[in-house]
Image (cartoon, rainbow, N blue to C red):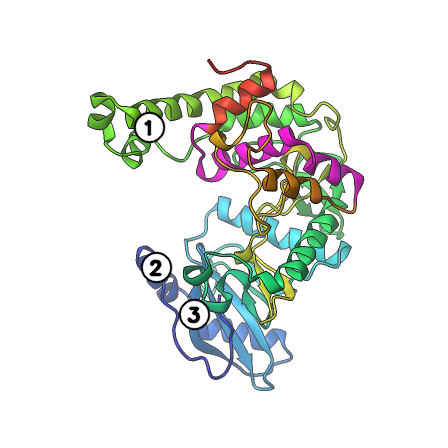
Amino acid sequence: MIIWTPRHKTRLAIPQNCWRQVHECVARTNWLELCLHASKLNHGMPCVMLPDMNNRLHHVVRVLEFEDGTRWFARVQMAKSTDATARALQSEVDVMTLVRERTRIPVPRVFSYKIYDEHLIGAAFMLTEFLPGNVAIDLDGGNKVHQGRIPPGHRPSFYTAVVQIQAQFSFLRFPKIGSITQNDDGTYDIGPIPNIGGPFSTAAEFFTAWASHANFPQSADSILEMMGGGRGGAAAGGAGAALAVRVIKSIQDFPRAIQILASRLSPTNNTGPFPLPYPDLYHSNIITDASYNVVGVIDWSACAVPWELVEFPRALPRVMDASRNYDAAWQHVDEDMRVRRKRRGGLDGALSGVLGEERAQTLAYALRCIWSWGSWDFMTRFWRGLGGEREN
């Protein structure tokens, strides 16, 4: 993201591998029609689309400016709409509406949206309230300068705000596990989770279904290549090849182990109510002012999950680490890391309990890794620990 000001007229650099998708999205979208649509929503006041744009992984983001100086965000989906993307966008809108209604978390108001491409504008989009600021990861030179770290002088207030946001999330609870759906009468219901199913009445049901549908995002060949050497390197032997074989076996074993242990993974929280955590509470989704005061949280995608999948906010210093940094009792070998964990808690007993439980945090981390982007040799060691086995 960038700070949108009248003086800032530079088009941001967009990653090379995104240019084709961005170009196709920009060409497909009828920006004039989007301006006319926004004008109708704002009492007919004329508006223009400012020239700057930004790519946020799956969307192109631009700013609409009305003649009175008011601004809105226009977020347009880069990929052509499908039933899956339509469900995801509708769920995001429903979650944003719910969180605005039931918490004090600063969520941008949604003025209008379309979940499919089949209309005059030509692309799925969302028009939202403008939040004056920048995502925290891009402040003070961005990730290239500070690697995503918050400056020491701003950490106490920023971290406190992040913890308070997570604490508010912990009070949003539902009788079942699944996606959030707003009904026509304004009430909310629980629906299925894409690619998993549901809704689920117990955590055990969820873990069993998750294990049946788990699909690691990297193939065995790509793992071998990333670890140096590909098939030839693995055949040649050596430490790298041995580690690659261990990683692949760990990935293959992990879902099966979760399925075997499903009934034991949530011993005290197997039945609802279940929390609605924000799964990616990270610097790139938190908008702040120049002093790192939080002004908004963006890019919503959340569903009710077992308590054991509630993690520490990713915007806080890392707690989970490589498996080699944990001892046989699953305690971090670094004393400072152990102290950090003890100091973190929440405003609610259930939240504090799950955040303070080492195995629950390990489980949450592991499932997020294999669900979204993949972890490495850590997984087999984790489930053996849960099942009472030890590595040789």
Residue 183 against residue 192 in the figure, above or below: below
Residue name at image x 64 percent, y 60 percent: 158
Quadrant assignment, res 18? bottom left
The residue that mark 1 highlights is 220
Residue name at image x 54 percent, y 79 percent: 65
Q: CA distance from mark 2 to mark 3?
A: 13 Å
Q: Which residues are magenta?
A: 348-377
Residue 360 against residue 314 in the figure, above or below: above
Q: Element under label 1?
A: helix
Q: Position of residue 107 (x, y in %)?
A: 66, 61
Residue name at image x 69 percent, y 25 percent: 266
Q: Amino acid at mark 3?
A: Met
Quadrant assignment, res 14? bottom left
Q: For the stretch drawn in magenta, what is the main secondary structure?
A: helix
Quadrant assignment, res 17? bottom left
Q: Element under label 3?
A: strand
Q: CA distance from mark 2 to mark 1?
A: 27 Å
Q: Which mark is residue 53?
A: 3
The residue that mark 2 highlights is 15
Q: Nearer the viewer, residue 239 or 269?
A: 239
Left or right side of 248 for 183: right
Residue 350 counted in the magenta span: yes
Q: Element under label 2?
A: loop
Which mark sits nearer the N-terminus, 1 or 3? 3
Residue 300 against residue 228 in the figure, above or below: below
Q: Cβ–Cβ below 8 Å for labels 2 and 3?
A: no
Residue 127 counted in the magenta span: no
- Which marked residue is nearer to the observer: mark 1 or mark 3? 1
Count neighbours of disc 2 (C-alpha within 10 A) and say few if under 14, some if 14 to 19, many if 20 or more: few
Spot the residue most to the bottom. 68
